[in-house]
Amino acid sequence: MKARLQRLIDNTAIPLLVTGGLGAMVVGSTAVPDSPQDVQFHSAVIVVAVLLLVDLGVRIWDAAGRGVADAGTPWHDRWLYISSPDGMIDVAAAIAVPLGLLLMPHFRDGYLFAIFWVMKYLQHSTGVGLLIRVAIRARTALMSIFTLFFVVFLFAATGAYLLEREAQPEAFGSVPRAMWWAIVTLSTTGYGDVVPQTIWGRLLDGWVMVGGIAVFALWAGIIANAFSEELRRRDFLRTWDLVARASFFQDLTTAAIADIVKLIHARDVRAGTVLFRRGQYGDAMYFIVSGEVSVDIRPEPKRLGPGEFVGEMALVHDAPRSATVSVTEPSSLLVLDIANFRELAGRRPELIATIEAEAARRRSANQAA
Amino acid sequence: MKARLQRLIDNTAIPLLVTGGLGAMVVGSTAVPDSPQDVQFHSAVIVVAVLLLVDLGVRIWDAAGRGVADAGTPWHDRWLYISSPDGMIDVAAAIAVPLGLLLMPHFRDGYLFAIFWVMKYLQHSTGVGLLIRVAIRARTALMSIFTLFFVVFLFAATGAYLLEREAQPEAFGSVPRAMWWAIVTLSTTGYGDVVPQTIWGRLLDGWVMVGGIAVFALWAGIIANAFSEELRRRDFLRTWDLVARASFFQDLTTAAIADIVKLIHARDVRAGTVLFRRGQYGDAMYFIVSGEVSVDIRPEPKRLGPGEFVGEMALVHDAPRSATVSVTEPSSLLVLDIANFRELAGRRPELIATIEAEAARRRSANQAA
Amino acid sequence: MKARLQRLIDNTAIPLLVTGGLGAMVVGSTAVPDSPQDVQFHSAVIVVAVLLLVDLGVRIWDAAGRGVADAGTPWHDRWLYISSPDGMIDVAAAIAVPLGLLLMPHFRDGYLFAIFWVMKYLQHSTGVGLLIRVAIRARTALMSIFTLFFVVFLFAATGAYLLEREAQPEAFGSVPRAMWWAIVTLSTTGYGDVVPQTIWGRLLDGWVMVGGIAVFALWAGIIANAFSEELRRRDFLRTWDLVARASFFQDLTTAAIADIVKLIHARDVRAGTVLFRRGQYGDAMYFIVSGEVSVDIRPEPKRLGPGEFVGEMALVHDAPRSATVSVTEPSSLLVLDIANFRELAGRRPELIATIEAEAARRRSANQAA
Amino acid sequence: MKARLQRLIDNTAIPLLVTGGLGAMVVGSTAVPDSPQDVQFHSAVIVVAVLLLVDLGVRIWDAAGRGVADAGTPWHDRWLYISSPDGMIDVAAAIAVPLGLLLMPHFRDGYLFAIFWVMKYLQHSTGVGLLIRVAIRARTALMSIFTLFFVVFLFAATGAYLLEREAQPEAFGSVPRAMWWAIVTLSTTGYGDVVPQTIWGRLLDGWVMVGGIAVFALWAGIIANAFSEELRRRDFLRTWDLVARASFFQDLTTAAIADIVKLIHARDVRAGTVLFRRGQYGDAMYFIVSGEVSVDIRPEPKRLGPGEFVGEMALVHDAPRSATVSVTEPSSLLVLDIANFRELAGRRPELIATIEAEAARRRSANQAA
């Protein structure tokens, strides 16, 4: 009961609240100061801020007892929550507006601190957690590129100052001024408000543009590669958990599981999802780890539960789907697509043999019916 | 006969029709309203729209009987077609202009809905199907990045509003106004219509440009990686199908096929294509799965059909091609290039031995002649 | 003798000629028409054009006899040359300026066709050949992305026309006019000459910028991935050739060579290059395939030739280089760096044992000296 | 003692000095010539320049005796230092400002040569060394892309000159002038100061933008891929060193080490770092290569040193961390995360068995306590 309420709050109430509050802040910034609209929008921000504070209090209080059984004092658990990434975001979001109203000289500007609520969106995003891990892992490489970028940036600004200061004293009259041009050019944004006029300045500019692309490309490549690796690692862990729990793979050695985990992937499916329809081309089979699927055959649908699999007939006999299959309750499935089914046939023929035997049995049962 | 007509319609008539209709819509937008040209262009759009509606009707009608033999009612099959990606595009394209003419207040604007016909180009593009699969697979990662982008975007707009509103009330007078600057800068487009003027605004801008590149780079990297993987998967399936059908590889175990599929790739060739010319450097050999090739030797050309291979002599003897080989009818070939030929020599020496024996036999036959 | 002359022409004379001619064309475009400078520059272009025509003639004539011994008529060989990529570039470059002078209404514009000479730079660039192979291999994927780009482009232009035509009839008054904005925005170039003014136009623009980045990112990723693979394939072939010729690896099976080729890489070194200096940290060893290196030890330098290796002592004993080694004539080396040396130790211990035995022998020889 | 002083100078004094000097140069450029501030900033630059000269002298002097024992004259060692990348940067930084003051006609401009000090930041950046190696390795590919870029660039400029010179003689009146537009467009910077006006010029521009993205994407992809590979190679070497020194892995064959090195990674940790806290989710275990960690258990903390491991209990029993573990002195650790722990269980079950036995022993010891 309580868990369900908590889920409702986490997945629906808080996001709605935060979105509403952010909207009020954004739109409120367009209102005439002290007009009725202004007051309304800012009141809405205050209401959300108060609710977030209450929510934080409840969360901290509830954190006690969530740790390991003998963790000692409840405050140790509470501290664990506050110092976790989730907790830090909750705290930051809750105190942002109160702090803003306190610190900013103009009251109206304090409401802008509601912008920190946007971090709440990042809490349930698995990708952002990944991103932080990636940044930590690849920090040496990323810092190097940043240093390199900084070096190119300083050289560009100093060079442009030297070459353009006489033609355009306003824009290039000192190194700090030339820096604005340098960053706009290095990032290939190119506003066009500052453009070199001399021939030498333009030659330099050409190299700066090319250099900017090269440096950022490097950065992009490293982040993207590291992110892909981290993603693969997470999928590996998730799939391993499901494979280890699936009764079909129960008797396998760890080495065999390690093999299979590379070829299969996990998928969580909502109740009501149609896995495939009769007559479609079949490109994957499904192992049910938890939940239930329903095979729509006459005279009445057949239900399959944990430990069973479905969809193998189209793969084995290379025929269209012979029945529609849908999910009747939230399920965790392992999906083996046709390319990997074939790879697996090469690496673990005994597994495929079991699947094919079941497919043959079902087919003859179908034909008998 | 009917199949050929259908192919003609699908590959030639519909693309021409759609291109013509789109052209009429685009050029029609430049015509003076109600001028004779305007009427002509819009009539052309109407004609194409009607033809697409007729085409849709015929397709829906014909869809019956295309499913599995015992699929029950013909309407089940028709529904399968309509709910397939192909069918949805056909329906959208057919009803676009009628709906547009109905819904838009100005008649002239209804014709612009012909833009939806452009989706027809995506139907026969294998890549777009891939792209959709990729988007589904990588959706968690992509949504995370999008969330991150949104967070950075909101912070940038709020910050710029705070820092620049006094210097430029027109462009930065509220958070929504500052958002225009934020998106133009984050995407490194940099129109230059709105540029921060204060020193603090420019400092923020520098970080926003760098942040924009980092976020988009991440996005790019993930899409590109996922796409490459999906592409590899599709090639694997296509090649597997051909290898399994090629009589040369008939006696192999599944494990061996899985090995070979990684080293060989499928290629469909039109009649008349010259595979290689006498005297060229030889960098690949070809297995014929279906179709026919002709080896241009004296006194009369030798024809090779399914199950045979060609081009191995240059690989085995490291010599230039000894004859010109061309394709005489549409053929499916498996191409083994020299790098993979060598890898295969390491992994499956018995296959290479068979190929070398044939090469030796052919060489002595050539020398005898 | 003739070969040396040919190399001199190919690597020095032609590039110089082409660069000179291109320079004359570029600078000539700045001259006042019919001024003495104008005439001089254009005469230079003519001279280069004539020389290129002569060179083409000689090349075609010389092509006979370059094919296989029994290739029949010399014109078959000549045709092979003309229809090769190299030959096509030679022909295009040679006839560009004559054709330009013939076709263009203004004589001065004919000289601009010298721009086609720039293709000569691509002839000796191994990367460009790779690029063409890559484009052919990945053409399905690239075409799909291009189609997708075109679809997004058309939607953007039509949408912007609908939303902005009243605010800015000059820039968005028809779909073709809106296309200019669409391409400038989709490519994130953002000149800023045309910027949407309405709130809806700007919302559309935001999505177009994001969409443009996504589409181009995809394109970039696919080209880059395909290029990397092709590069790896070429290196594999080059290294295989050297490993197969190196007497040290003579007795290996094909499987063993396939293994080693992945861990070693080929390098061509000019005479006089210093491979490493005494006292440096040692991170690689070198197998000599052809050429000669000199080990700078007392009382007189030791020369090592094909089949021998050098630099293994620092790897085996984890010590700084004990002598300076330089290359005395142009050499082909196989470089095994320390990371791969260790991998090889795991996979092929017998090879490493041989190397270690030699290292021990040399060390004791050194110590005895 | 001397080593510690050297470390203090290298890691703290020199970076501070350089940053201060660069700041003085940058800010000095904004001062009114010959004002008191101007003099102060420039004096600061002079002071830093002198200190860098002194530092260089000491370094060269000290370089003697750092090479191998019998390297002969001390000047050979000194020369090794000066000709190393580190030494070259030291020399360039030290002589930059003196040279600048000597060479530049205006005294004020000589100070700008302090910009070369920025290279000092690159000295301790491992990434920059990697980058140079990458550039050398991938130079063939990078040069090819650069050539391709140059070809596209020249074609674009010549084409734009031909198409736009009449509409905009100022911006496109000669090929060199059109080059400015070409580079701004090809790099997608798009300042907007020069924009084609004719319909044909705009068509060309569309292709140039698309081409620019394609070429740079290629470049980016190649650099990023090569960099990733080089990074992996460096991590491999670093991890190998630690694994070879870790007593836990002492008895393994080279093949087994090569296996493990792929699954484990090295991490240097400062004293005081908390590896994990009691009650957290456990996702990695740690092998201590050097240094010491402290396990916070009652009645008194347990200290673990080189050869021991920690954190395995949470992995083996899939439970939260049962104690907080922190590092008490600077340590080198090998981190085995849970995904790789499972892979290793498949590949090297005997190692995991040893770890599990220890985990069981510790658990029963805990429960007994």
Image (cartoon, coloured by chain):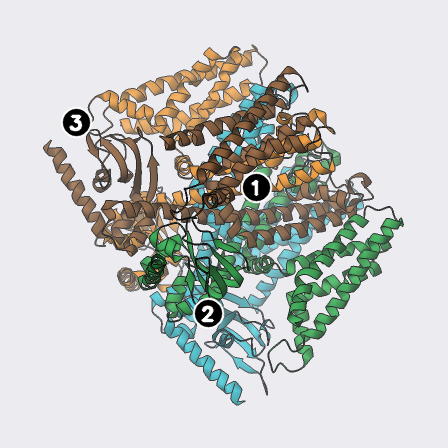
Chain colours: A brown, B orange, C cyan, D green
Quadrant of residue D89 within the rendered picture: bottom right
Residue D199 in the image, given as x and y percentages of width and height: 63, 29
Decide which of A161, B42 is in the foreground and name it.
A161
Look at the numbered discs 2 and 1 and tell me whether their residues touch, using CB distance below 8 Å: no
Q: Alpha carbon of mark 1 to alpha carbon of mark 3: how far?
A: 58 Å
Residue D213, numbered label: 1
Using residue B9 as the reference point, say whether residue C133 is left or right of it: right
Instruction: Determine whether the residue tagged by mark 1 lies in a helix, strand or loop.
Output: helix
Q: Is residue A138 visible?
A: yes
Eye-nearest disc, 1 or 3 = 3
Name the kind of residue labelled 1 in the image.
Answer: Ile
Name the kind of residue labelled 3 in the image.
Answer: Glu
Quadrant of residue B60 within the rendered picture: top left
Eye-nearest disc, 3 or 2 = 2
- Residue at label 3? A300
From this view, report whether residue A363 is shown above or below residue B58: below
Name the kind of residue labelled 2 in the image.
Answer: Arg
Instruction: Determine whether the residue tagged by mark 2 lies in a helix, strand or loop.
Output: helix
- The image quadrant where one finds the C terminus of chain D is bottom left
Residue C86 in the image, given as x and y percentages of width and height: 52, 53
- The image quadrant where one finds the N terminus of chain D is bottom right
Residue A215 in the image, given as x and y percentages of width and height: 60, 49
Residue D245, numbered label: 2
Decide which of D2, A334 is in the foreground and name it.
D2
Characterize the local packing of mark 1: few (<14), some (14-19) or many (20 or more) Cα atoms within 10 angstroms. Answer: many
Residue B114, numbered label: none
Using residue D120 as the reference point, say whether residue C31 is left or right of it: right
Eye-nearest disc, 2 or 1 = 2
The disc numbered 3 marks a residue on which chain?
A
The disc numbered 1 marks a residue on which chain?
D
Look at the numbered discs 3 and 2 and tell me whether their residues touch, using CB distance below 8 Å: no
Residue at point 31%, 25% (across, down) = B81
